[in-house]
Image (spheres, helix red, strand yellow):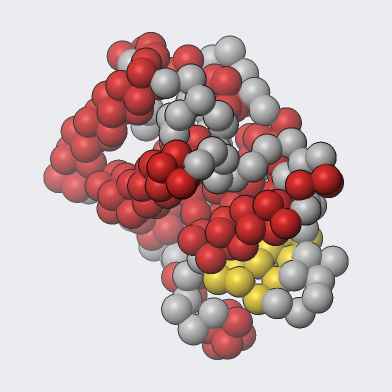
Amino acid sequence: MDKLTHFRLCPHSRSIRLALGEVGIEPTLVEERPWEQRPQFLALNPAGELPVLERDGGLTLCGTYAISEYIAEELRQHRSDNRQIELLPGGRDERAEIRRLADWFHRKFDRDVTRELLLEKVYARMGGALDHSPDPEVLRPVRANLRYHLSYIGYLAHQRRWLGGDEFSFADLAAAAHLSSIDYLGEVPWNEYAVAKSWYARVKSRPSFRGILADRVPGIPPPLYYTDLDF
């Protein structure tokens, strides 16, 4: 059976979990705390990064780019399988835009927002610093960055049916994965960004999101609205 090594709040892991759910693949989930840099995990992925997908046939794929491209290629080769979606739909130009946006969220959004919030509010505490308090001087610019990104998401969602174009794609999954991770921490000012909120509600309502919304981090509960599909 396929196995996915992940961490429950890691947005990169979440995007792949969502993608696998959308195409009907249900892997065994194995949780890893990447900050521990365990030798066994480094042997699996020397980069020490999540996620890692081990296919039933023995192939090991590391990182969102390799995994998402592999799944997309597999779907193109087996179009008769009646999968729910294509991760990279459309022609060459459309796929280029989807890849651009997936890269935007997994690199820029992560660097500007998600990584710092998780470090300050989750990873430090789970790494053993139980008395750690998030640094307001770190959080202030991160929250400003988040508003910039929410405005951009709202712009895209207003101009298009989905973020990458007319069809649902991995761009939507990448964006939703990051937003779901920081939404778990109560950090998203949804009421200030109605268009982005409406788009996220559509993604959040998809069956592939059920496992994500059920995840919990011990000692760090999500806000009450977190699992509410209508907010």
Q: Position of residue 185 (x, y in %)?
A: 44, 37
Residue 49 lies, in percent from the top left, at 47, 70
Residue at (53% x, 65% y) in the render: 66
Report if residue 220 is visible in the image.
Answer: no
- Check the picture and name the quadrant holding the C terminus: top right
Please state, as top left, top right, bottom left or bottom right, where the N terminus lies in the image: bottom right
The answer to which of 120 and 37 lies nearer the viewer is 37
Q: Is residue 18 above or below residue 4?
A: above
Residue 67 falls left or right of residue 171: right
Q: Number of marks in the image?
A: 0
Q: Position of residue 24 (x, y in %)?
A: 78, 45
Q: Is residue 110 left or right of residue 62?
A: left
Q: Residue at x 28, y 33 (%)?
A: 149
Front residue of 152/31: it is 152
- Residue at x-position 36% and y-position 18%: 159
Residue 78 visible, this orientation: yes
**At which x and y percent is residue 104?**
33, 47
Front-most of 49 and 128?
49
Task: Say which residue appears at 57% left-offset and 56% top-offset.
Answer: 68
Q: Nearer the viewer, residue 82 or 24?
A: 82
Residue 200, compared with residue 38, is above or below; it is above
- Taking the image as shown, residue 197 lies to the left or right of residue 69, namely left
